[in-house]
Amino acid sequence: MEQRTRPRALVVGLGISGISSALALHRAGWDPLIIERAPERRTGGYFMAVFGSAKKAAEDLGIGGRLVDHRPQETMTYSIDRDGRRAPGRSFADIPVDPYLTMRGDVESAAYDTLIAAVPDVEIRYGTVPVALEQDERGVDVTLRSTAGSETVDHVELVVGADGVHSSIRRLAFAPDSVALRPLGSMICAFALNDDLPTLPRGISASLTEARRSFHVYPFDDRPSTVLFSYRTDDVRAEMSVPPADRLREVYGPRLGPVLSAAIE
């Protein structure tokens, strides 16, 4: 049996948090093993604003040089109404602390490239989830199951759950979702557009704010904008049973106007 000289850590989740955790653990003298539920690295994602503390964290991990600010060089911010009429407004790009505006997928790729450069032989297992934890004074025996149904038991000294809101590690180690999650009475629907919106040329930021609902447009310098719908709801679980586009038409209708109609379609 190979004798390990560095402690081993299991990182569950290959998103920004998981990759950053693996980088930090490696620098601290650990050997990270990363597992990811998906069959391969996921790409894409939504708008992100990277502020000062996140910039500092990225620099400390060696990611900072790979981050790209996609703010348009020349932009305007408007408050809009249903008919697309515009008045001067404010957005993230106007905040004086100079945040980067970028996409989640770009940040994740920067972190992943930094990890591979630092640890070329890092072990990543795709299509794998944890199904059991057994902890004692020596560490943790973790039962891992692949999408094919095979199971292995790996011994590690540390387990990091970086697998999102519905964390499997939180369920196994602490509490089920029914106990750990508390609905906040709000829903968001966020996505990248394929084309520019009517009355809002590329590079224009906009917000529509109404009682219990809002709509925001975040522009980039090299691609169509991303949009964010946000609204209040009394039953978060029930929201999941309806196709998103149908639900948005119901919440923001019946008179959507040209901008909202184009965004939903």
Image (cartoon, helix red, strand yellow):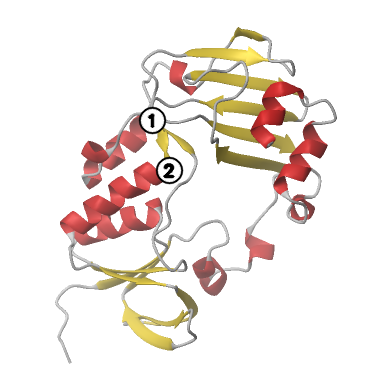
Say above or below: 91 vs 159.
above
Residue 231 on image: x %, y %: 72, 36
Badge 2 or badge 1: first in the primary sequence: 1
Q: Which mark is residue 51?
A: 1
Q: Nearer the viewer, residue 9 or 37?
A: 37
Which residue matches tag 2? Answer: 104
Q: Is residue 155 above or below residue 195?
A: below
Q: Quadrant of the C terminus?
A: top right
What's under tag 2, amino acid-wise? Arg
Amino acid beneath label 1: Phe
User: Which residue is located at x 54 percent, y 31 percent?
Assistant: 195
Q: Are marks 2 and 1 in contact (CB under 8 Å)?
A: no
Q: Residue at x 65, y 32 (%)?
A: 263
Residue 214: x, y in percent?
Answer: 69, 28
Residue closest to the far right: 254
Q: Position of residue 29 (x, y in %)?
A: 18, 64
Residue furthest out toward the bottom: 1
Residue 128: image quadrant is bottom left
Compared across the picture, whether 250 is left or right of 168 comes to right
Query: Toward the viewer: 66 or 197?
Result: 197
- Decide if residue 245 is on the left or right side of residue 91: right
Q: Which secondary structure, mark 2? A: helix
Q: Residue furthest top?
A: 87
Q: Is residue 71 left or right of residue 110?
A: right
Query: SS for tag 1?
Result: loop
Question: In the picture, residue 19 is in which quadrant?
Answer: bottom left
Residue 205, percent from left and from top: 53, 20
Quadrant of the rendered structure where residue 200 is?
A: top right
- Which is nearer the eye, 68 or 136? 68
